[in-house]
Each structure stands twice: as structure tokens, then as C-alpha cells.
Amino acid sequence: MKIKFIDDGNIAGWARLSLIGLGLAMFFGGLAIESLPKYVALVLIVLGIPVSAIGGYASRAKALGLKPFDNSYRKARDSYKAKDDEEKK
């Protein structure tokens, strides 16, 4: 069985929820655990915010029907190449 991280041009649902949960756990873990060295807690706080933001933005993209990880840009790029070749002749 192959695990799919990208599903239909977007991050898979389980991966989005995992990113949000992991980011929040890192953030609140860095704030709550007092036995951690200060630099480790700071790194957890600073990295927890973008990790959860990536999951949140991917969820919003899915709700809006956007496909940020789709390969449709290649079709557009190829259509410009065809027009450039015709103009040069």
C-alpha cells in the first residue's frame, strides 16, 4: 500500500490535519514544558507556527478548490512554446 501525501493537487486530508496538530503541539509544548532548555523551547515555538500554518493554508486551498501541487503549469508552458515557434517562422 502506497501512502499518498498529495491527493488531487493538494495535500491529503490526513496530512493536513497532522500538520495542524503537529504544529500546535510544537507551539504549546514549547510554551508549557518548563524542563526544556530555552533555545529548544524557542525553536519549537518558532517552527510550530509555520508548520500549523501550512496545514491551515492547505485546508483553505482545498475548501476553495485550488490545486497548488498540480502539474497544470506544464500545459500552460507548453502552449506558450507552441505559439513562440509559430511566430518565429
Image: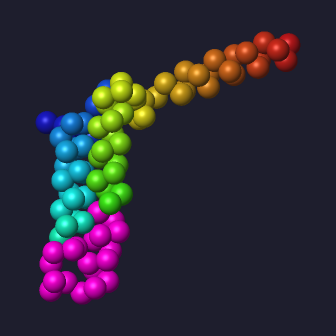
Residue 68 is situated, as x and y percent measured from the top left of the image, at 42, 34
- Is any atom of residue 19 visible in this view? yes
Q: Report the coloring of the rendering.
A: rainbow
Q: Main secondary structure of the magenta part?
A: helix
Residue 82 is situated, as x and y percent measured from the top left of the image, at 69, 16
Q: Is residue 54 above or below residue 38?
A: above
Which quadrant of the figure has residue 33? Answer: bottom left
Residue 16 is situated, as x and y percent measured from the top left of the image, at 24, 43
Residue visible at 41% across and 35% down in the picture: 69
Q: Is residue 75 left or right of residue 30?
A: right
Q: Is residue 58 left or right of residue 77?
A: left
- The C terminus is located in which quarter? top right
Which quadrant of the figure has residue 75? Answer: top right
Residue visible at 29% across and 53% down in the picture: 52
Q: Is residue 62 above or below residue 5?
A: above
Residue 59 is situated, as x and y percent measured from the top left of the image, at 29, 37
Magenta segment, which residues?
A: 30-48
- The N terminus is located in which quarter? top left
- Is any atom of residue 10 visible in this view? no
The stretch drawn in magenta includes residue 39: yes
Q: Is residue 88 above or below residue 67?
A: above
